[in-house]
């Protein structure tokens, strides 16, 4: 199942793809240099990140060759700043020994049952593997099909430990069921997020014209 969209004249899509990376703006003056995307789709999130952060280097893992072909040939990905691997994200995570990432987006979904759901269960073990590859001040973003899927994951447990991740937020689009959990290595507030969004002219314009739509709430550990 493939859903993706991007208008090169407008960074925000007004849909769920915006929420995958929006949590990076909890950081003061975010400038991620390295990002990991697990699940490429047709590359919307990659093109958005490349437009927002010109110096970013992106590694993307995708198991479907058709998705890779669409992303590289038709959706405007700058291949000089994107290293796309065909393979299983679980294998990549278990074998990765390279430098850490400032942003990790887990967008691993399957539509084999007719309804989108996570392709890899977001267990505590899986989250620890993602955490291992994250830089000291990095941001982790995990897409869930709905609130039920989030509650069944290891998100609350890893937040309750208060070790690496100090705070978590859940992003939702007003008309979609998805919940994107953003885990932070610092403490921040929704007002900080909004201030950073408004400091980027293209995003400020999108927010004013209702082209960037989100609701955000802190994730509780109980």
Image (tube, rainbow, N blue to C red):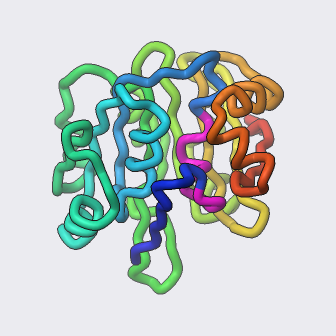
Can residue 187 be seen here? The reply is yes
User: Residue 77, position in %: x, y?
Assistant: 30, 52
Residue 30 position (above or below residue 118): above
Tell me what residue is drawn at x 23 percent, y 59 percent.
72
User: Residue 70, position in %: x, y?
Assistant: 27, 68
Q: Is residue 22 magenta?
A: yes
Tell me what residue is drawn at x 48 percent, y 50 percent.
122
The span picked out in magenta is: 13-23
User: On the rendered structure, is 100 left or right of 217?
Assistant: left
Tell me what residue is drawn at x 50 percent, y 16 percent.
137
User: On the rendered structure, is 153 left or right of 32?
Assistant: right
Q: Nearer the viewer, residue 144 or 212?
A: 212
Q: Nearer the viewer, residue 8 or 71?
A: 8
Q: Is residue 148 magenta?
A: no
Q: Quadrant of residue 220?
A: top right
Residue 213 position (above or below residue 96): below
User: Residue 69, position in %: x, y?
Assistant: 20, 67
Quarter holding the N terminus is bottom left
User: Residue 142, position in %: x, y?
Assistant: 52, 46
- Residue at far bottom of view: 114
């Amino acid at each position: 199942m493939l859903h993706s969209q991007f208008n090169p004249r407008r960074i925000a899509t007004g849909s769920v793809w915006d929420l995958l990376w929006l949590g990076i703006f909890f950081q003061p003056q975010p400038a991620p240099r390295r990002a990991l995307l697990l699940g490429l789709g047709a590359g919307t999130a990659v093109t958005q990140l490349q437009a927002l952060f010109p110096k970013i280097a992106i590694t993307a893992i995708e198991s479907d060759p058709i998705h890779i072909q669409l992303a590289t040939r038709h959706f405007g990905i700058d291949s000089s700043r994107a290293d796309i691997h065909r393979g299983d994200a679980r294998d990549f995570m278990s074998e990765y020994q390279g430098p850490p990432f400032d942003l990790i987006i887990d967008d691993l979904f399957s539509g084999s049952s007719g309804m989108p759901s996570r392709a890899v269960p977001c267990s505590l073990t899986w989250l620890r593997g993602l955490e291992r590859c994250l830089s000291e001040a990095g941001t982790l973003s995990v897409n869930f099909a709905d609130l039920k899927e989030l509650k069944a994951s290891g998100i609350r447990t890893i937040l309750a430990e208060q070790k690496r991740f100090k705070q978590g937020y859940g992003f939702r689009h007003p008309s979609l069921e998805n919940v994107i959990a953003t885990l932070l290595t610092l403490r921040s507030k929704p007002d900080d997020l909004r201030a950073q969004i408004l400091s980027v002219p293209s995003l400020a314009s999108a927010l004013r014209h209702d082209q960037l739509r989100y609701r955000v709430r802190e994730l509780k550990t109980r």
